[in-house]
Amino acid sequence: MVKRLAKHFIVASLVFLIAGCIDGLVFPTKGHLGTFYASVMGVPQDRLRPFLTDFVSKIHTHITLAGWVSLALMGIVYFLAPQISEREHYKKHLCYAQFWLWVIGLVVMCAGWHIMGAKGLRAGFEHGTPEFTRQVSSVRPLVWSGGILLFISSLLFAYNIVCCLWPSSRAR
């Protein structure tokens, strides 16, 4: 079970690595492909720079760190913990729940930021102004929901690793 579980985490991390690299290419190519990016991202051409600075940079950072780096490390830790403790003592259903909560939480949070930026900037408001905040208030729960899913997933991960490294005397 542990090898298959680790593979899920590592393969998903590679998907986020590619997504993060593609997202990162937007910044140096915005001068040449700005019209294309504005149309694909749903923001007016004149609002592309603040959208990239305030929102795409957050998305890029989270996809790369929480998606690629964290998922890969979780896969590695899931693989190594049984070798350290000399027993595989995971709650299998919680491992897979943790995986899906992490992936879905990250996608939901990043989608929320994208929608928030596009909606607020398309309406003509500057990020951080009260008008912008009011305009995007309906989207904020999407970002919070993604963050909450990531938090729950991290708790499940910690619980699973602790269960593997320090199983109770009843489990022995």
Image: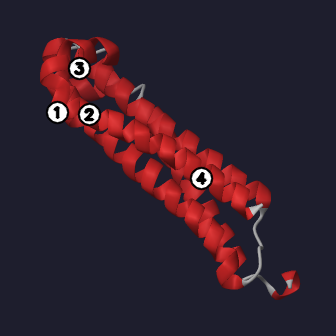
x then y, percent, for residue 40: 33, 15
How far, Cα to Cα, is label 1 from label 4?
30 Å
Residue extending furthest toward the bottom: 169
Name the residue rendered at 72%, 55% in the picture. 4
Q: Amino acid at mark 4?
A: Phe
Tag 4 residue: 9
Q: Which is more foreground, mark 3 or mark 1?
A: 1
How far, Cα to Cα, is label 2 from label 4?
24 Å
Quadrant of the frame with the C terminus: bottom right
Crowd rating for badge 2 (residues with CA inside 10 Å; few <14, some 14–19, many 20+) = few
Tag 3 residue: 121
Q: Amino acid at mark 1?
A: Pro
In the depicted view, which residue is nearer to us: 122 or 28?
A: 28
Tag 1 residue: 28
How far, Cα to Cα, is label 3 from label 1?
21 Å
Name the residue rendered at 22%, 27% in the picture. 51
Q: In the rendered image of this protein, does residue 140 appear above or below residue 5?
A: above
Q: Amino acid at mark 2?
A: Leu
Q: Which is more foreground, mark 2 or mark 3?
A: 2
Crowd rating for badge 3 (residues with CA inside 10 Å; few <14, some 14–19, many 20+) = many
Which image quadrant for residue 128?
Answer: top left
Q: Amino acid at mark 3?
A: Leu
In the depicted view, which residue is nearer to us: 137 or 112?
A: 112
Tag 2 residue: 25
* SS assignment at label 2: helix
Quadrant of the frame with the N terminus: bottom right
x then y, percent, for residue 71: 52, 54
How far, Cα to Cα, is label 4 from label 3?
35 Å
Q: In the rendered image of this protein, does residue 38 appear above or below residue 50?
A: above
Sequence-earlier tag: 3 or 1: 1
How far, Cα to Cα, is label 2 from label 3?
22 Å
